[in-house]
Image (spheres, grey):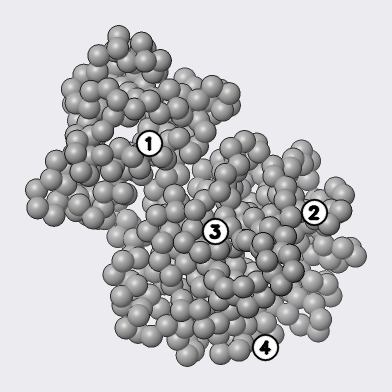
Amino acid sequence: MLKSTRPLISDQEADLLASSLRRRTLLGGGLAAAGILAVPLEGTARAATSGAEAEITVDQARTAPIPIIVPDLGSGLGQQIAQVLTNDLNTTGLFKVIPGGANAGTPDFAAAKAMGAHAQVTGSVTGSGSSVRVEIRLWDVLAHQQIQGTAYTTSAANWRRIAHIVGDVIYERMLGEKGYFDTRIAFISRNGPRGRQTTRLAIMDQDGANCRMLTAGRWLTLTPRFSPTRDEIAFMSYANDRPRVYLFNLSTGRQRVLGDFQGISFAPHFSPDGHTVVLSVTRNGGSDLYTVDLSSGVRRQITASGAIDTSPSFSPDGSQIVFNSDRGGAPQLYIMPATGGAARRISYGQGTYGTPVWSPRGDLIAFTRIANNAFSLGVMAPDGTGERIMTEGFTVENPSFCPNGRVLVYCRQTRAGAGGSGFSSGIGMVDITGFNDRVVSTPEQASDPTWSPLNG
């Protein structure tokens, strides 16, 4: 049963948050419902690419990033949109943005080719009061052909989203797979000395902009997870000195307890259809996995191994769950039917394994491995084969896939010295091949990142 409790934030705080956070609900009807009108621009455009038809694969772009010209799109907002678009493309490691060039009309293809470009963006940004019109065209420099042309009309406040949406269009048209720029990351913001840190549930754009704190920091808060279909985040909080899983509704700014378990509930994860949450519940020194139907509140226990079963994650089709358990003597990864039943072990490398998460593509499971007192972040196939380590460190853990399965966001921490000196906790991103490992800037120290769905 879903029950409310003493709120983590006041109703007044919730209303203020909701006014700036509401997003997925509006996107249910497409861009137009979100206050963004998108219409095609005339021009000779090639047919849309698919993964099989893409002229440049991601593997090719990883070896030789695609040179693309992105000019300023006018003064003011035009320059700002161009800068965000440039940053989005550059941070993938798959594009090499060349500044300059004409910003409107048909490009000078000979000049663009002389600059080494394979593609060019042109366009303009014009405003009228609080509204803005952004016209963008993407050109194939070598073929002398327009690939994409779209005009967006929206509130000027949406300018960053327009830049991310344009970036996603370019990513898809050039590489044949969906982009991930118009997304957000929820995480735990940490402030203060190690051992006495204030933790707050927070959310930001995937590039670190527009960071908002969702809780006030009165209680320890951990392990947020985005819903794939609702404007909602599940997380664990020690609110009122009772550790339990909560649901935070981004459309209303309010929260509710998920279930009324006697033990501690933790490590939530949504099903792909968003109708169910699987989580761990403590009992008799161990923990079992339960599912909770979000509509009816009906709970179902799906493990009873007598061990510590935790960190569950659904497969993309919702039929299976990967989790970590010490039922064999040490924490390892197991897969079982989502309805319960026999579990099979899939991890057999050196050390112990935890925090598994299934890729939205279904082909990989990311995990944390601890061996020789060091942490590694890796991926393996669902049958346990092909294990690869992507990055290592004093602590690297809690991976979460971006919507297209290409990039992982994770927590990276450094060793603490005397009295906690030198300790830091932050967010990193890395390609699933171990390519382009980088740091994401946050206002405070951070941990426990989770990636939203596209447009989430």
Type of amino acid at the residue the image marks with label 2: Ala
What residue would you read off at disc 3?
450
Q: Residues within 10 Å of mark 3 (few under 14, many from 20)?
A: many
Q: Nearer the viewer, mark 2 or mark 4?
A: 2
Residue 16 location in percent, x, y?
A: 30, 75
Q: Secondary structure at mark 1?
A: helix
Asked whether the residues under the numbered discs 2 and 4 touch, taking CB atoms below 8 Å apart as contact, a structural biologist would say no
Mark 2 touches mark 1? (CB < 8 Å): no
- Residue 161 visible in image: yes
Q: Earlier in the sequence, mark 1 or mark 3?
A: 1
CA gap between label 2 and label 4 equals 35 Å
Question: Secondary structure under badge 3?
Answer: strand
The numbered mark, 2 or 3, whose residue comes first in the sequence reads: 2
Name which residue lies at 38% across and 25% down. 98
Residue tagged by mark 2? 374
List x then y, in percent, for residue 448. 59, 63
Badges 2 and 3: C-beta atoms under 8 Å apart?
no
Tag 2: Cα neighbours inside 10 Å, few (<14), some, or many (≥20)?
few
Q: Would you identify the image quadrant in which residue 253 lies?
A: bottom left
From the image, tell me which residue sits under label 4: 262
Which residue is tagged 1?
86
